[in-house]
Image: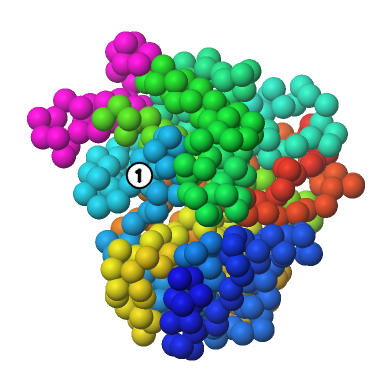
Amino acid sequence: MALYRIRFYKQQGIQAEFSPLVGSYFMKTQSSFSKHNDALYDLKAMAEKTPDMKALVRNFGATPVLILFDPTLKKHFAFQHDLYEVGDFFGEFFNIFTTGLVGVNGDEWKKQRKIISQSFHFEFIKDNLPVILKTTREHLKELSQKNLEGINILSEMEKVTGDVVGRIFFSENFKDYKIKGKPVGTYLIDTLENVGKSFMSVGYLLFGPKYIQKGFWKSHRNVMADVQLLKDTCSKILNDRKEAKLQNKDLAWYLLESQKNIKEEDRLSDQAIISNYVTFIMAGTNTTAHLVVMTLYALSLNPDIQEKLREEITKNYDTETDPISLYSLNKLNYLSATLKETLRVYNPTSFGPTFKSSVKDHNIGDIKVKKGTIVGAAHIFTYFNAKYFDNPHDYNPQRWIEKPNVSETYAYTPFWAGPRNCIGQHLAMLEARIILCEFIRMFDFKVSKNYKLRMNALKGYGPEGGLKMDLNIR
């Protein structure tokens, strides 16, 4: 089936790659990772060698995968979102990961998006600035008391971002919850990574999620036990939040308030609230932590950029005449440019999260798409394409000062585009700004001497095994 469908796309002039069993989709990323320490190396190389390539077809097991590069095709795809659905890759037992906003389809997605978007208004973001600031300072103070040589800075930042998301969702008492001695956010991210590893197997590709759920292997039984513990803990957190009857207008308050509505289409179930908490942890913990960490990595390799940013922060962040606010943070222009450049070079969602299954035959631009094809956008192709970015392999925040707009709008979509763009993007950028400002004021930092960056794409595009740094308190 996959070979037949791939031939269908090849006849349209689209480059096609096929591998039996697991498929070229995984084979290419794993080959790039093992040979070049970068799972997306092959796509960057394509951008350099064939910058006008519009799309590529690979196979995921028996299913063809249409990977879009061209910005115009990406736009068509983003705004035809009702022609696709998120596939049931995990199965019923693992639905805690898939029944939140990112994983649902159709009317359920519209309902969840409508209810949740009503919470993400300007005042909600502004009201959570003190939460982000307090949580960041608490964690950085704890960090300052550790041995700061060879510290895994990604692990530390995931603690910060996971706690921030938890407190924004469930208020201050969230920090008291642990699973197996780990913060809930950290445990969730670790569990998701183990789930992903379990599903990267020939057995899964041949038999689907039930292969994992049968528990033939100890690793499968362990990951199912971890998921069940996660479900039970999240249910307890939500029930405790209900019983506390707090009037704090955290995100849980807004979502629980929806349950008072008469119409079913205006209410979120407990399961939907829990799944969206998991969704926000996955998105807010992992991606924001990666954004902060990869910015620190780039700054450590570029001391001139670091010094320029440090100077801006020293002069303008949390001063007597300009205390911390949304307005003052938005005036840090070089910090904004630095974050935009990190999102171009090291974006954790450069490849993967947009991929969905087409529900019927249709066209994307001049490409005919068959029902059942997985379609998605590989942003990394345009981010490393000289057609859109001069000297794309250079880390250069100044490009966003001198030329803030990309020639093709959909060549740069760090939070995706269209109706299904990232609902929490403004909160994530606020969080990244605060964490970086606080960290840079508190520490000098450099990459550990024997550390070598290896970028994998298992749980987003990020450093395999974390990122080691040596810190000194200023």
* Residue 108 counted in the magenta span: no
| Secondary structure mostly seen in the magenta stretch | helix
* Residue 265 counted in the magenta span: yes
Which residue is denoted by mark 1 in the rendering?
101
Using the rendered view, name the quadrant where residue 26 is placed.
bottom right
Q: Residues within 10 Å of mark 1 (few under 14, many from 20)?
A: many
Q: In the depicted view, which residue is nearer to us: 51 or 6? A: 6
Q: Is residue 155 left or right of residue 69?
A: right
Where is residue 98 shown, x and y percent of the image?
40, 42
Check the image and report above or below for 57 versus 233: below
Q: Which residues are magenta?
A: 239-268
Using the rendered view, name the quadrant where residue 396 is placed.
bottom right
The residue lying at 61 percent from left, 85 percent from top is 50
Where is residue 271 shown, x and y percent of the image?
32, 30
The residue lying at 60 percent from left, 29 percent from top is 222
Where is residue 316 shown, x and y percent of the image?
59, 45
The residue lying at 38 percent from left, 30 percent from top is 274
Check the image and report above or below for 192 versus 371: above
Q: In the depicted view, which residue is nearer to us: 383 or 183? A: 183
